[in-house]
Image (cartoon, rainbow, N blue to C red):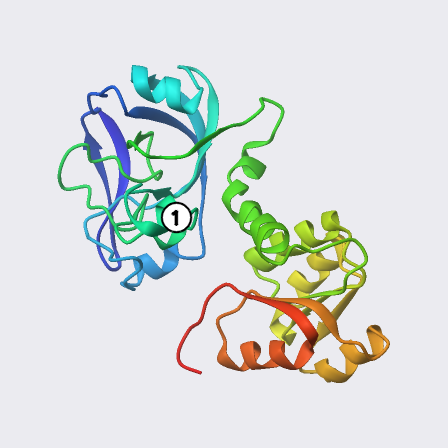
Amino acid sequence: MVRAVVLEAPYKVVLRDFDLPRIGPHEALLRVEMVSVCGSDPGLYEGKDILGTRYPLIPGHEVVGHIAAIGREAARLYGVKEGDRVTVEPYVLCKNCRYCLTGYYQLCTDLTCYGMNVSCADPPHLWGAYGEYMYIAPNSRLHKVAPEVPAEAACLSSVVGNGLRWIGTKAQVRPGESVVVIGPGPQGLATVIAAREAGADPLVVMGLAKDEMRLELARQFGADHVINVEEREPVGTVAELTAGEMADVVVACTGSPSALQLGLELLKPLGRYVIIGLNGGL
């Protein structure tokens, strides 16, 4: 028997025992080393529907751990063996829809997400990382983690991976291009790290007065300028920092409609705009 934290319903958390699942040829079992709290986890606790939430569930999807058991085909496909240290991407893919087949698997029409939209009521139960072990389903994506990487850093691999994708794959930032990041939350800070590595110049981060600590972190992570938009007029400030040209790239790491509109005003002609999500209507 193993133990896991179960969110039985909004605002109702219990500790429960489960049997370890039997692992088939395409499956694996992860012994959890550490799991971090994603920004979506409090929403699950409060009852928000995230990707079709189904209670009861075991939360947790930003995880690092060691392979405790793995099927023959899974070992071959993932290139890992028992004892290997890995991190697990949150999504389990159908690999049949047009989005999976064209590389946009985050838009999968039959998407499963660890710790979010699979109930723990039925076997194999352990669909989240808030426990001693986590079940790894077929069509998962695993990445080896070196022993010297701190667990705290490994847990953030999916967050940092988002930043790398938005800056590298989507915006295709080149050295010397100006980048503005709106929103210095975890996703925004990951984007700052990626933009710094890509050679953004200048790299500007915007936030509110309540983001003072996060804006300071953005500076530590390589931002050339941080702007409290409640104290400084953002459009004019970016114009000044870019000699009137405005930004080559804007990444909006907040779902605020007003922030998304601001991003349009910060772009130069033919600039690239990455929007990671939207809360509410425009």
**Quarter of the C terminus within the rendering:** bottom left
Which residue is farthest right?
243
The percent position of residue 262, horizontal first and vertical second, equals: 61, 80
At horizontal 14% and vertical 42% (from top left) the residue drawn is 121
At horizontal 19% and vertical 41% (from top left) the residue drawn is 120
At horizontal 35% and vertical 38% (from top left) the residue drawn is 129
At horizontal 50% and vertical 63% (from top left) the residue drawn is 276
Residue 93 in view in this figure: yes
Which residue is farthest left?
122
Give whichever of 166, 39 is nearer the camera: 166
Q: Which residue is mark 1?
A: 105
The percent position of residue 62, horizontal first and vertical second, equals: 44, 42
Residue 158 left/right relative to 110: right
**Quarter of the N terminus within the rendering:** top left
- Neighbor class of circle 1 (other Cα within 10 Å; few <14, some 14-19, many 20+) is some
Residue 212 left/right relative to 47: right
Residue 54 left/right relative to 260: left
The percent position of residue 72, horizontal first and vertical second, equals: 31, 15
